[in-house]
Image (cartoon, grey):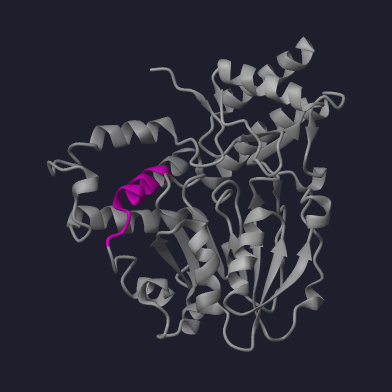
Amino acid sequence: MNRTFNFNAGPAALPETVLLEAQKDLLNYQGTGMSVMELSHRSKEYEEIHNGASKKLRKLMNISDDYEVLFLQGGASLQFSMVPMNLLTEDTVGYYVLTGVWSEKALEEAKKLGNTAVLSSSKDENYRRIPSLDLNQIAENAAYLHITSNNTIFGTQWNSFPEQLKVPLIADMSSDILSAPININQFDMVYAGAQKNLGPSGVTVVIMKNHLFERSENSLPTMLNYETHRKNNSLFNTPPTFSIYLLKLVLDWVEDQGGIEGLAEKNDKKARLLYHVIDESSGFYKGHAHLDSRSKMNVTFTLPTEEMTKDFLNQAKEDGFVGLDGHRSVGGCRASIYNAVPLEHVAKLAEFMEQFKRGY
């Protein structure tokens, strides 16, 4: 069966070996006579999957016992609400750095629940770069500083993170988690929807320092309280078992690729291929992001006219490239080159871009 060249922004490409493994287990997981989707979430077989996923993530990211790993639902969008619900206490302020649509949405939800402030923003430049920060502007009553590490719509990414903060640092890493090594100890909380680098949609990973759980009040709705999920090993209610199973397979695959370091090397090569075509096109392709803020996960660019863009996307689709349309709020084109997108597919896209330019 022919596989397409999948550059979708999310749900995104999954490793082919992971899909084949899941296909093999689909009807009969390890001799149980049941699919993973049919296993009880209280069964020994599922418990091994659940705990195995947590253990493997801890190993890959060097997560210490100072943190809890939670498997939740609702995507990053629910975390936009859960973070301030649990952590934005009375008389404190949640600080946000605006770098795109998703950081805006996170701020909008926090405003409904408490006091907020924008520490920095690049909105006036149509989010072409990661803005500089003046950490001295953070007041003593700050509850946390929230950032979005990679911005899928605008194609920008943080190359380094704030250090020596006196307040908890929280990051939405939905679109670049596991793509390059990070020092998890810089963060008090990291969360990520799985559907870009971790697995399929349906599960959200939350990595959270133990001290933050102390802020979760008993008055919160049970399912919106982080403490509920910590106490119950993310098994208070039925979890998205099949999504967590696939997450575990993806984490095994990451390990087989040489871990996060191995993937980072491949991701660098993929990004360089596309940005080289853009930079050497004499303006035919124009990247949206500033050079120092370019994303290695989402390469965004425009062509000289809308008609040429439409022609580019139509020809690309005919040649088997899927998901290259830019987000409706930005337009142009976007190639999402997450961990599971093979280097060979990115090379094919770079070749197509060069051929298309020559045709004009």
Image height check: is 275 above or below 117?
A: above
Residue appearing at x 18%, y 55% in the figure? 40
Can see residue 141? yes
Left or right: residue 218 compared with residue 342 = left
Residue positioned most to the right: 282
| Position of residue 25 measured from the top left corner of the image (x, y, whole percent) | 24, 37
Q: How many marks?
A: 0
Answer left or right for 314 relative to 212: right
Quadrant of res 236: bottom left
Q: Quadrant of the N terminus?
A: top left
Magenta span: chief secondary structure:
helix
Which span of residues is magenta-colored?
238-250
Residue 17 lies in the magenta-colored region:
no
**Residue 123 % position (x, y):** 78, 56
Res 344 → quadrant: top right
Q: Report the residue that reaches farthest toward the front.
A: 307
Q: x%, y% of residue 18?
A: 38, 36
Tell me the quarter of the image containing the C terminus. Answer: top right
Q: Residue at x 37, y 48 (%)?
A: 248
Quarter holding residue 21: top left
Q: Residue at x 81, y 43 (%)?
A: 291
Q: Quick check: can you spot residue 63?
A: no
Residue closest to the eye, 67 or 331: 331
Residue sticking out furthest to the top? 359
Comparing 98 with 49, the one in front is 98
Q: Where is residue 279 in the image (x, y as percent from the top left)?
A: 82, 29
Going 70% across and 37% down the picture, which residue do you hit? Answer: 331
